[in-house]
Image: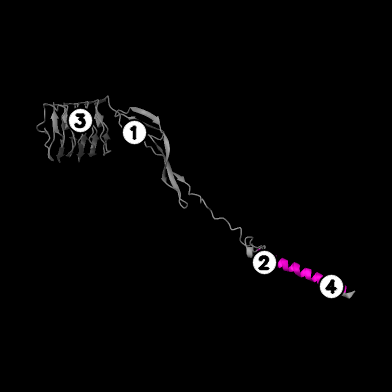
Amino acid sequence: IQFENNDDWIPIGNESNAYQGIFDGGKFTINGLNIQGTSNYQGLFGFCKNATLKNITTGYGIVNGSGNVGGIVGYAEDTQIINCMNNADISSNGEYNGGIVGKAVRTEIRQCTNYGKILKGRYQNGGIAGRAEASLIDSCINYGDINNTDHSGGITAYNVNGTVSNCTFSKDWKNDEDKHWHECECGAKSDEDTHTFKWVVDKEPTHTEKGSKHEECSVCGYKKASVEILALTPTNPEKPNIDKTNNDKGSVETGDKTNIGLLTSLSIISALGIAVLAVLEKKKALENK
């Protein structure tokens, strides 16, 4: 069933004229449920009393209101809601908002599933029911995200003298510094295990600045506090020039080929001079005889 370009669906039933019949949706999907309401009791059904709603599926859409807003019904009293599914998003400026029903009083909600997001809600926002009083919620599942954290819950935000049974564990991980687990609306835990940590670099170090890294669980995403990574050590430090002249000792650079040639020439000249002097001294001695 397709609601074409409908931005002003009028919910079935209101506070002064509640819906009190039996409605079987036949498992058909109602797409395009768009409600731009600014008052209470908004949904496919606005206000139900002593009614039965079953086999209803709402597809894409958005339901707006100022309180008691739900994808299937805004307010339900002494009513049965069975095998219903909601995909429309919920946005409310008031309290009591849920994927299936905004507020349920003495109502049975069985085998219902919500995929719609709770985009906004002032108080008590639940994946199935925002507020449940003396009601039964059984075998229901919520997959929709809830943006508001003020008194919010995966199944119901506020359960007064009611029962939540055969509930389904949240797909989101709960954790502490040692373990992680999936948690049910009733507080029971499943898939509890210790963290599996891996190192994640937040900032790479350089030669001039330090970096940082942290340990993070690869299963649930729990993060430990960041730790420091020391700055890098230079890989090619400047080497001292061992060929420079040591002025204190008067040494000569060993790599200077010009100086070596000069010394050799001076040595040869000195040797020749000594030889010549020796010959002259020997000749003079012979002449004196």
| Chain-order first, disc 3 or disc 4 | 3
Q: Quadrant of the C terminus?
A: bottom right
Chosen colour scheme: one colour
Determine crowd level at label 1: few under 14, some 14-19, many 20+ residues with C-alpha closer than 10 A. Answer: some
The disc placed on residue 10 is none
- Of tags 4 and 1, the one toward the viewer is 4
Sort mark 3 into few (<14), some (14-19) or many (20+) by Cα contacts within 10 Å: many
Camera-nearest label, 4 or 2: 4
Residue drawn at the location 74% of the way across and 68% of the way down: 270
How far is the residue under mark 4 from the one under mark 1? 115 Å
| Mark carried by residue 262 | 2
- Pick whichever of labels 4 and 1 is earlier in the sequence: 1
Q: Residue at x 34, y 33 (%)?
A: 173
Q: Are marks 1 and 3 in contact (CB under 8 Å)?
A: no
Which residue matches tag 4?
Answer: 283
Q: Which residue is mark 1?
A: 173
Cα–Cα gap, marks 2 and 3: 104 Å
Helix, strand or loop status at disc 3? strand
Q: Which residues are magenta?
A: 260-286
Three-letter residue code for mark 4: Lys
Residues tagged 2 and 3 counted as in contact (Cβ below 8 A): no
Indicate which disc, 2 or 1, sits on the residue closer to the N terminus: 1
Dot 3 corresponds to which residue?
Answer: 85
**CB-based contact (under 8 Å), mark 3 and mark 4:** no
Of the image marks 2 and 3, the number of the one nearer the N terminus: 3
Q: Quadrant of residue 82?
A: top left
What amino acid is at disc 1?
A: Trp
Q: CA distance from mark 1 to mark 3?
A: 24 Å
Q: Residue at x 25, y 29 (%)?
A: 141
Q: Point out the image quarter for the N terminus.
A: top left
Label 1 or label 3, whichever lies nearer to me, is 3
